[in-house]
Image (spheres, rainbow, N blue to C red):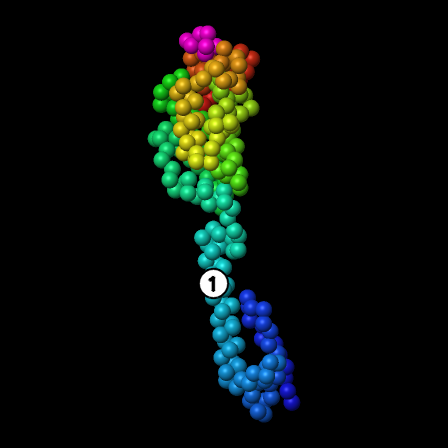
Amino acid sequence: MYYKFKIIPRHHKSRSIFTFSPFSRIAVSSSGFLLSWKGLVTLYEMINLFKVKAKQKEIAENANGKLPGKKQSAGELRLHKDISELNLPETCSILFQNGKDDLMNFEVTVHPDEGFYVGGTFVFTFQVSPVYPHEAPKVKCKTKVYHPNIDLEGNVCLNILREDWKPVLNINTIVYGLFHLFTEPNYEDPLNRDAADVLRDNPRLFESNVRRAMAGGYVGNTFFPRCI
C-alpha cells in the first residue's frame, strides 16, 4: 500500500509529490529524492514553522499601521521626510484627522499673533499628490474669511502653490507662506477683489471689516461665522 501527497512550500515555486509506504517507512519524491519518515515529519514541521512566522510578521505589520505588501509612493516617502523635519511657528499646528494611515490628507491651523487677523483661528486642508513634490499640494481654507487673497470658496492665492512651486520646497514652506498671508495680506494679487480694494483704499475700514467678520457677522451681504 502506498500513499501519495504533495508538499507545497509557501513562497516557493517548486512542488514535490511524495509516495509513502508504511512498510518501508521511506518516502520517495517525484524527483527521486529518498526521505525517511522521520525526516519527512521534520520537513513538514519546518514548513509549518515558516507559515507561522510569516503570519506573525503580517500581524506585526498590521499592528504598526502598514498594509502587507503595500508599496509607498515617492510622494509618501517625501512627505514622511517633510513631516519629520517640520519646524512650525508656535502660531501654527498640524492635524492628521484620519490618523497615521492617511498622511496625504491633513489640516493646518493658523492662529495669527499680529496684524489685522490677530486672535483668529483659520483651518486649511492639504491634499498631497502621489507625485509630490513635483506637484504642489492642493490647499483650501475651511474657515470662511474676509481676506483679499482667499475667496469665499476657500481658494488660496499663494504664489508658491502656483507658478513659483519647486520640488525643493516643502510643507514647512507652505505653512509659513499661509501665516504670512495673515500678517501681510496683499491687495495686488487678489482673489477677493472687494476686500483688496478696501485694503488698498481704506486700511482702517478694512481692519473694521476683518474684526466684524471674525466676530461672526456681515460684511456687505456676506455672513462670516465666528472664528475668534
**Residue 100: percent from the left, percent from the top?**
46, 45
User: For numbered disc 1, what is the local secondary structure?
Assistant: helix
Q: Is residue 1 above or below residue 178?
A: below
Residue 205 seen in the current view = no
In the rendered structure, does residue 199 fall within the stretch colored magenta? Answer: yes
Q: Quadrant of residue 5?
A: bottom right
Q: Residue at x 42, y 10 (%)?
A: 203
Q: Residue furthest bottom?
A: 23
Predominant SS along the magenta part: helix
From the viewer's side, name the closer residue of 58 and 13: 13
Q: Residue furthest right?
A: 1
At label 1, counting other C-alpha atoms closer than 10 Å, the crowd grade (few under 14, some 14-19, many 20 or more) is: few
From the viewer's side, name the closer residue of 147 and 134: 134
Q: How many marks?
A: 1
Q: Residue furthest top?
A: 201
**Residue 20: percent from the left, percent from the top?**
60, 85
24 with respect to 100 (left or right): right
Q: Residue at x 49, y 20 (%)?
A: 149
> On the image, numbered disc 1 is attached to which residue?
56
In the rendered structure, does residue 145 fall within the stretch colored magenta? Answer: no
Q: Residue at x 64, y 87 (%)?
A: 2
**Residue 108: percent from the left, percent from the top?**
44, 32
**Residue 188: percent from the left, percent from the top?**
48, 15
Q: Quadrant of residue 199?
A: top left
Residue 185 seen in the current view = yes
Magenta part of the protein: which range?
198-205
- Name the residue type under label 1: Gln
The image quadrant where one finds the C terminus is: top left
The image quadrant where one finds the N terminus is: bottom right
Q: Residue at x 58, y 69 (%)?
A: 13
